[in-house]
Amino acid sequence: MPLPRRAMRWLALGLAATLATLGLTACSGSDDKGSTGASATVSQADIDKAMQTPTELTFWTWVPDIQKEVALFQRKYPAIKVNVVNAGQGQPHYQKLRTALTAGSGAPDVAQIEFQNIPTFTLTNNLLDLRPYGAGALKDQFVDWTWGQVTGKDGQVWAIPQDTGPMGMLYRQDIFDKHGITPPKTWAEFADAARKLHAADPNVYLTNLAASGSGVWMGLAWQAGAKQFEYSGGEKIGVSVNNATSKKLADYWGGLVKDGVVSTDPDFTDQWYQGLNQGKYATWLAAAWGPVFLSTSAKDTSGKWRAAPLPQWNAGENKAGNWGGSTSAVIKTTKNPIAAAKFAEFLNTDAESTMMLATQQFLFPPTKSTLTNPTFVGQKPEFYGGQQVNELFVQISGTVSTEFQWPPFIDQASNDWNETVGKSLADKSDTGAALDQWQERVTSYAKSQGFTVK
Amino acid sequence: MSALTAAVPRRRRDASRRAAVGYLFVAPFLVIFVAMLVVPLVYAGYLSLFREQLIGGTSFAGLDNYTRAFGDERLWQGVARVGVFFLIQVPIMLVLALAFALALDSGVLWLSRLFRLGFFVPYAVPGVVATLMWGYLYGPEFGPVAQLFEKLSLDPPNLLGSDLMLGSIANVVFWEFTGYNMILLYAALRAIPTELYEAAAVDGAGPWRTAWSVKIPALRPALLLALIFSVIGSFQLFNEPQLLQRLAPNVIDSAFTPNIYAYSLAFTSQDLNYAAAVSFLLGLVIVAVSYTVQLGANRRRT
């Protein structure tokens, strides 16, 4: 029958045509659209004009209730409308962002990007340098290390810091009182308390080290001074996640987990919230934004929590680590760079906006003015039984070392942590060996992506 | 110019006009089929021949991605895992579906319509909802199953632990798809000509013998269809483990099943090209297994 053959010929032709067009479009490559060198300052006249022009901005964020702060911006600049979109929290948000950027359409104007994810997006040249829009002048308003994290190799300002996550130890006063424990000041004391507590009550653990929580691990490594990653842009990267300090951390926590005195339930799951509610964990090594989760999901425990600095490795020291914290960054493909840059600036520097974020959404501020504002410092949340937690976290915030760097593939590194170190914690196997595995995985991934690993 | 040669062109013209109308009818489907299935497939194949690095950009890699995939231990462990899943879960599910379909057909069950609906409803529940619900039921300390065990003073099994995880996923898949397969088989049972039953009754066959010798052989094509669907479904296992990963992130890693591996390669490791190659290889494996299954079934027939 000649007909099927004719049909096949047409199909083949059609396919060849589509393939050819696809090939042409794919090969044309659109990597370097937009000028990379132009950092000439935009004049105030241009800025004013742009802020009066009717514009629509899209803002991707997962901060609950941020519409309140956005409303403040819209009140000041009525010509600009901001659409707030929640594209997921953490990894799903970044995956969608990357997909939209690769596809070339659908990316927002402004996006929430955590500190550790900034290198991922600067490597692929997706963020807009905010210096031409006056961001350079904002430097002194922010705590040093936060500004360091958003500054590029050549002085570019990639994002405006929004909140930070200085780590502390949130503990249950009632459980401590019941078993006669005082908040440990060193990790050695912490280990002793863990053993004593679990022996007295096998249903309670001094803390939970989530086997899915690479964020906490990095924060603790930050505190211990382990320089895990060395990366400041370009193709050279240093990876030493299994250095001596990290091994010390692994021995410490591996030991506690093997003895069964610290649990390893994945965090932010139903079971974990149940555990918190039932008093299964006596402490939570958390960041300053921790309370916002507890106050909604562990409401029954309200009033029983207190905060203290993390235990130290050496008595008398005062060092802390950071877990999380976000910024507002402008995506390079935006059609409204001036409006977007000014929005990011307003959201995170306007006095009313920052105070609202700090007191109503419990985001720990990176702005010096809010950190010294008596209203903020003197807050006595009922959740902490009236303790002035903000004052404590302000002190802690000042002790976070400024020398922490992130690799430009943090999602991959975190996943690898889950599958090596996290797994060893859950299985109670050798955490030190798992650290070596993690090192191996990260290095081979870096090499396969073309990096030169120091 | 004989009458014969004059007639031939007209017949060919009629035939080609009929063919054109036929293609016109199929065109809407064909357009969507080509745009949504063929083009992405071709594009993925095209992508799999390249390599994109974070440093260094895109370069032509030929069949390097496929060579890498062949030697990738994690990929083949995932394939083995879904293979084991298929070998254990599918026969049990099909036997159950067959048993339910036969029971419904025999008219033994009263309220058969209710049972039919009841078995089928889980299939109507979206996979995401089903998995989240079962994830809650499986909760190691506060889930209902664990609490039941504790009430009986027994050690609750860790249903989300590495030994039982595959079984727990299989349970969710049973719950979701047994009804679907049952409906498939029940419909085929309804289509069996009644003369066969009369002949069997004349030969003195009771209900069990009828089921074994008349109904099941007549169901062979439907069983084969259900089997092929199950092959494809089990090898492409993704929804259930992906959703349970949040609850057991150390048991379900990023290469637990080949589809999860391809997904994490594309969206976490940002290695779209290798992900495309892995997907094609998985497709090949599924084609190979389906073909083997069909061969086996057809050979038994003759």
Image (cartoon, coloured by chain):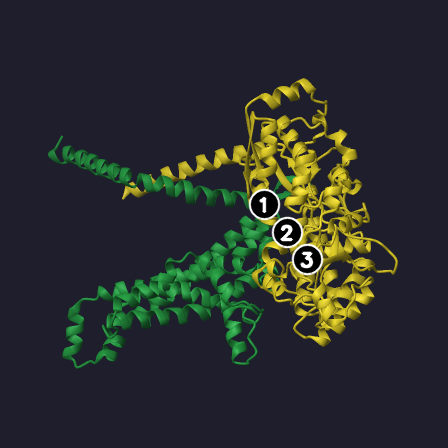
Residue at x-position 53% and y-position 33%: A25
Q: Nearer the viewer, residue A328 or B76?
A: A328
Gap between marks 3 and 2, in whole Å? 26 Å
Name the mark on residue B168: none
Q: Quadrant of the N terminus of chain B?
A: top left
- In the image, is A451 to the left or to the right of B118? right
Instruction: Report which residue position mark 3 lands on.
Output: A417
Badge 3: how crowded within 10 Å, few (<14), some, or many (20+)?
many
Q: Position of residue A166 (x, y in %)?
A: 74, 50
Q: Position of residue B136 (x, y in %)?
A: 51, 64
Chain seen in green:
B
Q: Position of residue A409 (x, y in %)?
A: 67, 47
Gap between marks 3 and 1, in whole Å? 28 Å
- In the image, is B7 to the left or to the right of B60? left
Same chain assignment for discs 3 and 1: yes
Badge 2: how crowded within 10 Å, few (<14), some, or many (20+)?
some
Gap between marks 1 and 2, in whole Å? 10 Å
Asked if disc 1 and disc 2 are in contact, CB closer than 8 Å, the reply is yes
Secondary structure of the residue carrying tag 3 is helix
What is the chain letter for disc 1? A
Instruction: Report which residue position mark 1 lands on.
Output: A64
